[in-house]
Every structure is written in C-alpha cells, then in structure tokens.
Image (tube, rainbow, N blue to C red):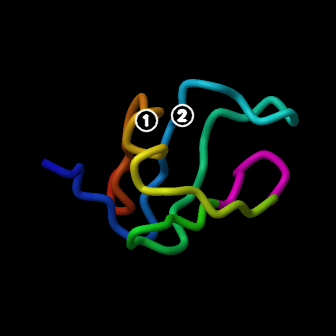
C-alpha cells in the first residue's frame, strides 16, 4: 500500500544531499515526485518507488 504523501509535506530521506540536508519538501505527487532540498533549494524529480523506499520519516505540513 502506498504511503500517503501530500504536497507541502517534509520528507526525511536516508541519504543526505551533498549540501548536508536530509529533509526535502514535496512539490509534486504522482508516479514521479518533485522534491526541493530544504538546505540549498535544489529541485529533483524522482520515481515514487524510489521515494517510498528511501523515506525515513514524514512531517505533515500542519505539524511543527
């Protein structure tokens, strides 16, 4: 069963971005995801399967 991702959620991935950040903001959801690095602002498109596999945690947009 797919993990319920929503636009605006903050996703913590297993591997860090070269800038040192582990956290990404979800900008687009579908078969592919558009993620924005919260450290440097870099945007990437990744397959849903890859994002679900590498997700360590999700922080919903309404939570602190």
Residues at discs 1 and 2 in contact (Cβ within 8 Å) = yes
Residue 46 screen position, x and y as percent: 58, 57
In the image, taking residue 54 as reference, residue 19 lies left or right, namely: right
Q: Residue at x 12, y 48 (%)?
A: 1
Q: How many numbered marks does the figure carry?
A: 2
Give neighbour class at mark 2: few <14, some 14-19, many 20+ (Cα, 10 Å): some
Q: Nearer the viewer, residue 58 or 43?
A: 43
Q: Which residues are magenta?
A: 36-41
Residue at (71% x, 52% y) in the render: 37
Residue 51 relative to residue 4: left or right = right
Determine whether 18 is above or below 60 in the image: above
- Residue underneath mark 2: 13
| Within-10-Å neighbours for mark 1: few <14, some 14–19, many 20+ | some
Secondary structure mostly taken by the magenta-highlighted segment of the chain: loop
Q: Quadrant of residue 61?
A: bottom left
Task: Tell me residue 25's x, y (percent).
Answer: 56, 58
Name the foreground residue: 62 vs 55.
Answer: 55
Whether residue 47 sits left or right of residue 59 in the image: it is right
Question: Horizontally, is 62 left or right of 34 in the view?
Answer: left
Relative image position of residue 50 (x, y in whole percent): 48, 44
Q: Residue at x 80, y 29 (%)?
A: 20
| Sequence order check, earlier mark of 1 and 2 | 2
Nearest to the observer: residue 8 or residue 16 = 16
Per the image, label 2 sits on a secondary structure element best described as strand
The answer to whether residue 39 is magenta is yes
Residue 38 on the magenta segment: yes
- Depth check: give the residue in front, 1 or 18: 1
Farthest residue to the left: give it: 1
Residue highlighted by disc 1: 55
**Residue at the (60%, 41%) spot, across then down:** 23
Q: What x and y, as percent, mark residue 63?
A: 34, 52
Q: Secondary structure at mark 1?
A: strand
């Amino acid at each position: 069963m797919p993990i319920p991702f929503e636009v605006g959620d903050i996703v913590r991935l297993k591997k860090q971005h070269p800038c040192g950040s582990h956290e990404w903001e979800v900008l687009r959801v579908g078969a592919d995801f558009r993620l924005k690095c919260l450290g440097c602002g870099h945007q990437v498109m990744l397959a849903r399967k890859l994002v679900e596999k590498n997700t360590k945690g999700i922080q919903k947009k309404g939570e602190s």
